[in-house]
Amino acid sequence: MFVFILLSALVLCGCAQYSSDQCNWRGSGLTHEAHARDVEQVHLRCAEGSLEWLYPTGAVIVNLRPNLAPADGQLRACIKPRPDSRGATLHVEQTGALRLLLTEADQAAGRVRCFALQEGALFVEARARRDISRRITAFQYRLISTQTPGDEPYSPTAACRPCADDELLMAICTSDFVVRGSIHHMEEEEEEDEDQASVVLSLSHVYSQKSRVFVFGGGGRGRGRWTGRVKIPRRCGPRAAQGELLFTGAVRFQEAWLRCAALYRDFIRLYRAALDAGTNPCHIDTD
């Protein structure tokens, strides 16, 4: 009897409705369904983590403030929704003013959006509905220094331009992946993203990769090749190239994002000139 009473009390007070640590938060709108305009304050202090809000009602203000911030204090927060995320819209909030970041349709398409932490907090606002069942708002977040190579493709306004010679040489040192090969095709996705495209690569060499975004397989008698997908801004779509390409980029939310690409023969010429001049920032095995 005592156990039953204790469990009932926990349910009634909503004490079991929240789970939080420094990096992640999980909560339920059922704790304040009777007060549908309640606003919850959440403070997360890690460089990456997640949020899961069951039966969203009211709003959640998410303050992303890492314990260890870069010296220049310049950080961007990138948000990747879970494909089944629904029931709320995401805004950037500063002194009461809201800027729309992700609609429900954007979340369903898995679109990544970023904002500068100086802009304010993340305001997650539940959509007014009579039936909140079967609705979960969920996303991953990651904080990125504005000086980190590879974060630019997240922006719909990212410039479509070749990397300068010094940028390409530095990308060899700082990128999450460095590979060589060719573009096989651009994927046609069921939910086409107006800002982002996915390109399938066929690779002859993987120089480095921090995550297994490129895998080896197919073909017998040593004929297998490395393959994988990279994300690019759709308006910077792939262009025909004569010969193999060198690709570099960043891995964000288990996805490869293209940073710099160049004809491999042009890169080799540039790299060998830098070697002769002693200006190459790091070494890569080109044999």
Image: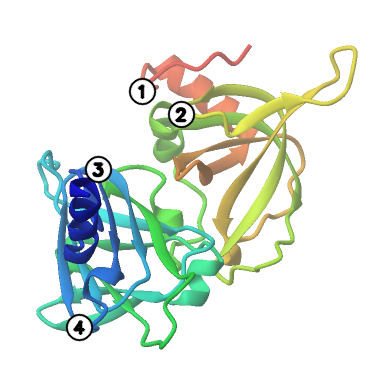
In contact (CB < 8 Å): disc 1 and disc 2: yes
Please name the residue shown 42% across and 75% down the image: 87
In contact (CB < 8 Å): disc 3 and disc 2: no
Eyeballing the image, is 26 above or below 207? below
Mark 3 to mark 2: distance in Å? 24 Å
Please give the residue where the numbered disc 2 appears in the rendered image. 172
In contact (CB < 8 Å): disc 1 and disc 3: no
The quadrant where residue 90 appears: bottom left
Q: Which mark is residue 281?
A: 1
Please name the residue shown 38% across and 50% down the image: 151
Residue 257, visible in the rendered structure: yes
Q: Secondary structure at mark 3?
A: loop
Q: Secondary structure at mark 2?
A: helix
Name the residue type under label 1: Pro
Sequence order check, earlier mark of 3 and 2: 3
Q: Which mark is residue 47?
A: 3
Please name the residue shown 48% across and 58% down the image: 82
Mark 4 to mark 1: distance in Å? 58 Å
Mark 4 to mark 2: distance in Å? 54 Å
Q: Which mark is residue 35?
A: 4
Q: Secondary structure at mark 4?
A: loop
Name the residue type under label 3: Ala
Q: Is residue 66 left or right of residue 215?
A: left
In contact (CB < 8 Å): disc 4 and disc 1: no
